[in-house]
Amino acid sequence: MNFKKIIWIFFLAFIVLDIFLIYSYTQQNDYVDATTNTVNGNEASSILKSIHNDQITTGKISQAKGAGYYIASVDDDYLRDKADQLNFVSWAYNNHRLTVTFATMVKLGTNPQKTMKALLNKENQVINGKDYRYAASLSSKNTLVYTQLVHGKPVYSSAGQIRFTVKNGYVTGYTQGYLSKVQTLREKKETISQQRALVWLYQYNKLPSNSTIEWSDLGYTKLLAVNNSTIYIPTWNFYIKNNASGNYYYRRINAFTGTVMEED
């Protein structure tokens, strides 16, 4: 048999296998969603009272459901291939992340958000900067974080974020990840509410007593990697402070099934 023909057969076999694995995984998640994660209104109300009695501060929690997709992004070298369009910078590339240092630091001035918006709009300074939005909850005095938006939701993974380094009021550079060639794997699907995610977090014993939920948001995070592609799903992301110890915790809930997900 022709050697090139054998290679093509193996290549097509791997593609078929990947599609089957992704389909099987999403079907399994649908089964879990339909058979295990059900809480009626009375149970939810009782659990919310228990949360309050355990001195857990939640703030306002929404009961509204949302929607999202299973999506896939190719693990390619998109940023490296685009980096030559950048001017007045030096850059390095490693593990699908682009690290950039500005030749002249950018002064934030009296209106940092306006300055950053203008910077993100410059294609010769930031690749696809318009695809990101500011994430105040992830940012600090020395780091400004911008998350890539996919189907209107932020990516809570460094693979889809820009982290700008700030020193003495000046932006010195950034590290960027970007989800390229994003594809939807299935039709839009309903997600659980913020309240339902909180209830499951508590029932899984992932919400310590005497704690405060600093923030929570619905966004895309990594589910699994399959042959040079990464699958992302909508997750409820909670940032929690243990008031007794002062420690902070990051927790994720699968917004389709309500199951707890491990750290990305």
Image (spheres, rainbow, N blue to C red):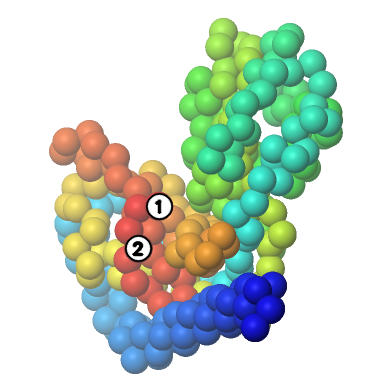
- Kind of residue at badge 2: Met
In depth, the one of 225 and 162 nearer the eye is: 225
Q: Give x and y (percent) for residue 35.
A: 34, 91
Where is mark 1, residue-wise?
264
Q: Quadrant of the N terminus?
A: bottom right
Which numbered dot is residue 261?
2
Disc 1 to disc 2: CB gap under 8 Å = yes
The residue under the point 57% across, 21% down is 165
- Quick check: 6 above or below 238? below
Q: Residues within 10 Å of mark 1 (few under 14, many from 20)?
A: few
- Quick check: 199 above or below 188? above
- Kind of residue at badge 1: Asp
The residue under the point 52% across, 80% down is 17
- Residue 90, by quadrant, is top right
Residue furthest to the front in view is: 1
The residue under the point 49% across, 27% down is 140
Q: Give x and y (percent) for residue 114.
A: 76, 27
- Residue 39, by quadrant, is bottom left
